[in-house]
Image (spheres, grey):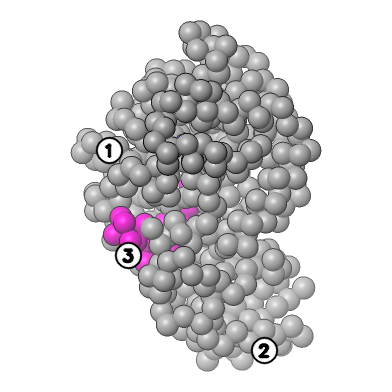
Amino acid sequence: MTTLIINIKELLGTREQSVLLRGEALAILPSIENAFILVEDGLIVDYGAMTELDIKVPNKPTVILDVAGQMVLPAWCDSHTHLVFAKSREDEFVDKLKGKSYADIAANGGGILNSARVLNDTSEETLFQQAMVRLKEASLMGTGAIEIKSGYGLSVEGELKMLRVIKRLKQQSDLCIKSSFLAAHTFPPAYKENHEGYINSIIFEMLPVIAAEKLADYIDVFCEEGFFSVEEMETICKAGAAYGLKPKLHVNQLNSIGGVAAGIGLGAISLDHLETMTNKDIKELAISDTIGTLLPTAAFFLRMNYQPARQLIDAGAAIALASDYNPGSSPSANMNFVVALSCIQMKLLPEEAINAATINGAAAMELMDEVGSISIGKKANLIFTKPIPSIAYLPYSFGHHLIDKIMINGIFV
Ligand code: NIG
Ligand code: FE
């Protein structure tokens, strides 16, 4: 099926070459005013200015869509989520509003362990159905590619169940999906005093099955004081590497304990969170090939300091933006709000935020050849805005519903 979309007020993120953006390049969002885009069998096959239309597309297809006044940009690439979970945790949220601390909640079996308990009691089918609904919601908010983690199983059966759910989502959803194995999210109660035992279970019981069933693309570890140490992260990632799993890691959310340097040393595709960064961490990340994935809605929800985005960009680090969608620290998959918040609170320019949430997000999932920009041959994953005066209006008018429609693989959602 071929669709010609004409009279686009501005077509944003047009790129002949897709490269990871860093430094000043992050602020450059190439665009064409008064543009067209031609979509065939789910892919972008041509685009350009309306003045070139008759030359570039001499034979017009039967389906022509006039979107006068609308802007079109690549769909969001959300490179860090925990979208598969069994139950929301608004009860803990209210307890915290009433004054309970995170430690109180954790001591009562709350937090990640709460999610793990419920998940282990929930069937694969139910988890799949719930996750499919959330994926649909995310796509209606403009997300076209997404990474999803395990990490609420914390048992052999639970982790494999989560990853099998993600595999089914990959097969049945139109979105581009990558999966990460995060059994090292926290230590389950039975292994609280026996870290080696749990790590052995990850390495010898979970990883071989994951590799045999091709259940994960990446390996993740929550490297923080009170969770996994740098050494434990290295042990787990090296075992993952033996099965071809590259690391995408949770580091420096709460403390700077050496996770950045170690993650870079392990060849991590991305290091995610980064609320707590020393100058040394920033410098090391800036000169590396590893992407820093910032999760500002987690900082917002937990009332923490935001990530030092400006320092990272100015130092030359490659950054991406993601939602961290999960029931505990970021119960929202809304990338529009992530983009707005990063401008409002971290002083990203609108162009920087959009690039970080599209092309650099795609890079953080190694999907730069498929999504993240308006390029010939890439998937037609597109956001059509309502009539807006300029692209800066998107983060400026935060919380407003400014999307008119979403196209995924050439089909309107
Ligand atoms: O990325 N920080 C670790 N994991 C999640 C939160 C998990 C939870 O509270 O359920 C995060 O923020
Ligand atoms: Fe996370």
Disc number placed over residue 277 in the picture, else none: 1
Callout 2 secondary element: loop
Q: Quadrant of the N terminus?
A: bottom right
The residue most toward the left is: 279
Residue 15 magenta: no
What amino acid is labelled 2 in the image? Answer: Pro
The verdict on label 2 being within 8 Å of ligand 2 is no
The percent position of residue 295, horizontal first and vertical second, equals: 42, 47
Residue indicated by mark 2: 58
Q: Are marks 3 and 2 in contact (CB under 8 Å)?
A: no
Please name whichever residue, 378 or 215, is drawn nearer the observer in this view of the structure: 215
x 42%, y 39%: residue: 98
Q: Is residue 90 left or right of residue 104?
A: right
Residue indicated by mark 3: 349
Q: Earlier in the sequence, mark 3 or mark 1?
A: 1
Can residue 400 be seen here? yes
The percent position of residue 379, horizontal first and vertical second, equals: 63, 62
x 61%, y 27%: residue: 116
The percent position of residue 130, horizontal first and vertical second, equals: 71, 45
Which span is picked out in magenta?
A: 342-366
Q: Earlier in the sequence, mark 3 or mark 2?
A: 2
x 59%, y 18%: residue: 202
Q: Is residue 345 left or right of residue 111?
A: left
